[in-house]
Structures are given as structure tokens and as C-alpha cells.
Amino acid sequence: MLSVLRNRTYLHLFAAQIVALLGTGLATVALGLLAYDLAGVNAGSVLGTALAIKMLAYVGIAPVVSALAHRIPRRRLMAASDLTRAAVALTLPFVTEVWQVYVLIFVLQSASAAFTPAFQSVIPEVLPEERAYTRALSLSRLAYDTESLVSPVLAAALLALISYNWLFWGTAGGFLASAVLVVSAALPKPVRSESVGPEPVRPGSARREPGRAGGPGGGVLARSVRGTRLFLAVPRLRAMLALDLAAAAASAMVIVNTVVYVRGPLGRPATDVPIALGAYGAGSMVVALLLPRVLDRVPDRTVMLPAAFGIVGLFGLLAALTAAGPGAWRWPVLLAVWAAFGAVGSLILTPTGRVLRDSAAAEDLPAVFAAQFSLSHGCWLLTYPLAGWLGATLGLTAASVALGAVSLASGVLATRAWHAVPSAVAPAPAAAPASGKRGAAVPG
């Protein structure tokens, strides 16, 4: 897996991702402590609102930035996003009102909504070979999981020596280092669409429309909805959106209700909360390490669709667990269920980049990645409050059943959509040189 790091450009980009993730992790811890200082016992509502603002920024900003991104070199766009995030992090220690937190979080997450899709769309161009790109996706998944485990530990160690305000300085340092690494990377020139006639329509792919959304003749509004239109037009991208919803249901249950179940019905100490969250991250990491070899031999669909139904089964097991009476056995079972949630979630999320890359023409990749970023966070915007409200009002068993039903519906929709592959293949015009370029779709 580490062989892809021999590519100097990818090495710089991956290092940028790592330091930015560590900075984000430190900010997460510091933001919770800042919210408690500002709001006391109402800190939970402050963080909940900040999380909602984060998701709204992701959903609304990413497509718009993607529509404007063709006017800005991608390296400059990513570096500017990092510098913006660093500036916000340096400002957070000086806020005195809750509303100021909300404004700054919106700015910070808007910059993240600009950075992440641009970063994701560059990687398949830097690593065009299938094996290398698959391993890069697994490394990226591994980086996210490692950050979720390392950042809290690092923050705890630093807090023993310094106040939490200094963590924001560490966050700013991470974003500044990311900007330097991005600027130092020699990025390939982006593929531009040309009005040379339609590309061949391959099974499961989208027909490119020259001069319309995503092409040179499209306006900002047309470009901003280009990726979403592709998601609605391409069967396996519709399936991808349904799978994102299933994965979001699983992660929402873990993130929102771990502390509720561990501290409440199980009566475990606060120190067991990170252990449970660590089990979720560990399950995801194991799959991220093993999946590249699997994807060398089997199609993405064979891995991803069963994972959605695996989530359904795990919600059924969780419903039984939360309805069961007292017993010491519930703690190890919860750890196993959380690890399994992480594993099946990784089975869906890790191959996502491959599916997106193989479902759109090369010049549409930025729009498709931005749309996936926005739409997937829309799924979390739905499942986070669903997990929280149902768990608080009807109980964890009811929440498990409801989210399991969401996952089941998502799995069924994904299966039907991904198998809805057109049987006809349009002939490729002789004058269309772009049709053989990297980024054209392959059968799903």
C-alpha cells in the first residue's frame, strides 16, 4: 500500500492531508472546551448547532465553489482554503460570544468545502493507474480513522501542559503546513472539456453534453448543479448516494449515541466512551488495510452492496442489545458491534473514489466529487438529528430500528439502481479524441 508514496506529488498531497486532519482533530477538542466556557451546561446545544452549520456549509458551498473553480488553479484554490482555515483557527481563541463561534465555524467549514472536493478530484489524475489509485483511497480512509484515534490522545497530552486555547494554534499550524505542502506539489493540468461532439455512452456512465452544464458554455448556476445532475442521471451514482445514506445512518448512531448508551444503560465510566469510539475506528482501519487486495479481484459493487445490508443486520443486533436486560456481556458485545459498524462503513466509503472516477468524464470529475461531498454530508445532516432525537425521545431501541429501516431502504434502492445499467452502447464519433481519455466510465 505504501508504494504509492513513491510518487512525489502524491506524497506531498497525502502529507498535507495528514497535517490538516491532525489540526482539525485538535480544533474539535478545543472547540468543545470553548463551547463549555461560553455556554456552560448548554455547551451540547452549541456544539450541535455548530455541527449543523458545518453540514449546511458542506451541502451548500461545495457545488458553488466547484462551479467557480475552473477560473482558479487548483493548487491556488487549495492553498487559499488552507490559509482561510488557519486564519479562522487563530481567531477562535479570542471570541467572547456564541454567535461569533457560529460565524467562524461557517467560514472555516466553507473553506473545507472548497478544499476537500478539489483535493479528491486531483488524486485520480496524479495516480491514474488502477492499483495505485485504489491504494491511495485506502490510505486516505486510514488517515481519517487514525486521526480519530490519535487527535484526542495528542490533545489530552497537550492539555496537561497548556491551556486549550493553544490547541487552536496547533490547528492553524496544521493548515499552514498543509498549504506549504500543496504549493510544493506539481499538480497535473486539469482536463478541459472541448466541444468535439458527444463522448460514447458506456454502461452506467453519463453522456457529456458539450456547451451545457460543466462545459465552457455553462454559467455558474449550470456548473454548480452539474455534479448533482450527473448523480441523478447515472445509475451507479444514484446507488452511491443511497449507500452514503446507509453509511451515514451507521456513523450517526455511533457518534451521537455512544456516550448516551455507555454512560446510561451500561453505567460505564467516562473513560470507556473513547474506547467504544476507538472500536469503531479500529474496525474501519482493518478494512481499509485489507480492502485494496480484495478490490484487485472483485468489482466495487460486489463489496459495497452487501455492506449496506450488513449495516441493517447490525442495527437489528443493536436493537436487541439495547432492549436486553442488565448483564456484563453487553459491553463486549457493544464493542464488537461498533467495530463491525466501522468495518462495513469502510467497505462502502473506501471504494467511493473509484466509483466516481469511473462514472464521469475526466473534465467532470471536480463537479462529481463536489456533488458527492455535498450530497453525502446532506445524508449526515439527516441522520445526525434522527439518531439524536429518536434516541432521546423514544429510546435507543427505537432509534436502532428506525435507522435500520433507513439502511434497508437505502440498500434496496442501491441494488435496484446499480443493476439498472443501460444495455445499449452509443457508437463513438471518430472526431472525439476525448472518448479514450482516463476518466471515461467502464461497465459497473
Image (cartoon, rainbow, N blue to C red):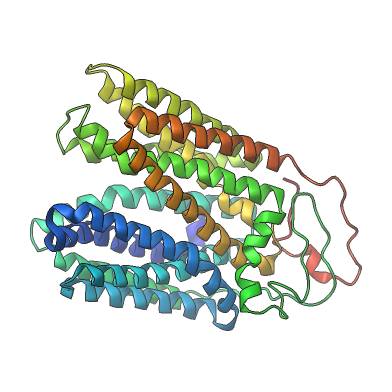
In-front residue for pair 180/397 = 397
Which residue is painted at 60% across and 41% down in the image?
295
In-front residue for pair 332/297 = 332
Q: Position of residue 372 (x, y in %)?
A: 56, 57
Q: Is residue 27 visible?
A: yes
Q: Position of residue 300 (x, y in %)?
A: 63, 42
Q: Position of residue 137 (x, y in %)?
A: 52, 52
235 shown above or below 8: above
Which residue is painted at 31% across and 72% down in the image?
103
Q: Is residue 373 left or right of residue 191?
A: left
Quarter-of-image position of residue 154: bottom left
Q: Position of residue 180 (x, y in %)?
A: 38, 76
Q: Is residue 56 left or right of residue 169?
A: right
Residue positioned most to the left: 161
Which residue is painted at 41% across and 70% down in the image?
110
Q: Quadrant of the C terminus?
A: top right
24 shown above or below 182: above
2 shown above or below 216: above
In-front residue for pair 157/29 = 29
In-front residue for pair 378/200 = 378
Q: Is residue 1 visible?
A: no
Q: How many marks?
A: 0
